[in-house]
């Protein structure tokens, strides 16, 4: 895994936007479309605001979700709420190219299958997403792949449901589709992440994040998160 340690979370967000923009321009030039999957979190919303200022072929950019809480539209817990505020309000991306996980559906299992179908339509079958942005939880979770949850064992579906976690069930991408992505971009900020970052880099399967393939991955971390690691 490539590593870049920056001084602050603001610097991480700005650098992440630069990397995404570069990948987007290359993907559109090569394949006519760029599809990125975005996780939630404060630094990612800064990242998306910075991305909105980049010169991109926005008409060829599609944004999908890594995970989402099962909550009503507009709920403050929804990643989509912040995604729209951070990107759609500031970048000229067509609204129908931000693809929300269908967490308001009555049949959530069918909703997972429907979202898998959407990913196939955008990214081929099997779906290969251009860039997946991931964060790292203080408990070692990433996406909504949560320690001890059966969702971490799923290998025959690309989108699945979790058990309740922090009072919400979630819809999440699973390991198979994350591991096929062309580029995994880890954005890790904050001192509370420091104990888990060495385990991520070691590929420690004792935490969900450690089981994500690292061959095509980049880590951006701020100094507080990276205090327990040394870069080569």
Image: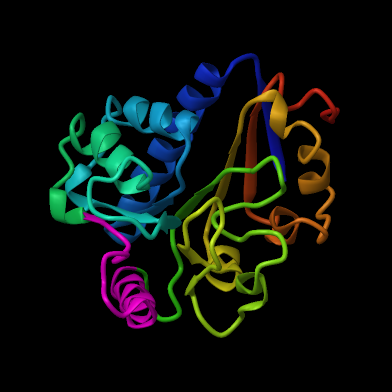
What residue is drawn where x is 46% and y is 23%? 14
Front-lying residue, 156 or 97? 156
- For residue 145, which quarter of the picture? bottom right
State the count of labels.
0
Which of these two is toward me, 126 or 138?
A: 138
- Most extreme residue toward the front is 167
Asked if residue 34 lies in the magenta stretch, the reply is: no
Q: Is residue 192 above or below residue 98?
A: above
Q: Position of residue 94 (x, y in %)?
A: 13, 48
Left-right relation of 16 to 50:
right
- What residue do we see at 36% from left, 33% from top? 48
Residue 169 x/y as whole percent: 47, 62
Q: Is residue 119 left or right of residue 140?
A: left
Q: What is the magenta segment's predominant secondary structure?
A: helix
| Residue 64 shown left or right of residue 8 in the figure | left
Give the quarter of the image for residue 58. Answer: top left
Image coordinates for residue 126, horizontal then vertical, percent? 45, 79
Q: Residue at x 83, y 55 (%)?
A: 204
In front of the other: 231 or 227: 227
Residue 80 sits above or below residue 151 on the image: above
Q: Quadrant of the C terminus?
A: top right
Q: Residue furthest top?
A: 7
Magenta residues, as a range?
98-122
Q: Is residue 83 above or below residue 127?
A: above
């Amino acid at each position: 895994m490539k590593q870049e340690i920056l001084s602050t979370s603001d610097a991480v967000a700005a650098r992440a936007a630069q990397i995404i923009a570069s990948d987007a321009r290359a993907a559109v030039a090569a394949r006519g479309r760029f599809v990125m999957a975005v996780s939630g979190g404060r630094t990612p919303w800064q990242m998306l605001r910075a991305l909105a200022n980049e010169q991109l072929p926005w008409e060829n950019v599609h944004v999908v979700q890594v995970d989402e809480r099962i909550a009503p539209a507009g709920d403050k817990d929804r990643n989509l709420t912040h995604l729209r505020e951070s990107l759609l309000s500031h970048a000229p991306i067509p609204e129908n190219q931000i693809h929300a996980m269908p967490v308001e559906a009555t049949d959530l299992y069918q909703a997972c299958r429907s979202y898998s179908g959407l990913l196939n339509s955008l990214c081929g079958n099997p779906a290969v997403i251009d860039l997946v942005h991931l964060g790292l939880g203080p408990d070692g979770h990433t996406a909504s792949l949560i320690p001890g949850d059966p969702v971490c064992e799923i290998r025959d579906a690309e989108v699945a449901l979790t058990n309740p976690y922090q009072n919400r069930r979630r819809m999440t991408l699973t390991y198979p589709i994350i591991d096929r992505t062309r580029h995994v971009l880890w954005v890790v900020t904050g001192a509370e992440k420091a104990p888990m970052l060495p385990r991520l880099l070691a590929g420690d399967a004792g935490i969900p994040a450690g089981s994500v393939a690292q061959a095509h991955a980049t880590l951006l971390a701020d100094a507080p998160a990276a205090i327990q690691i040394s870069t080569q």
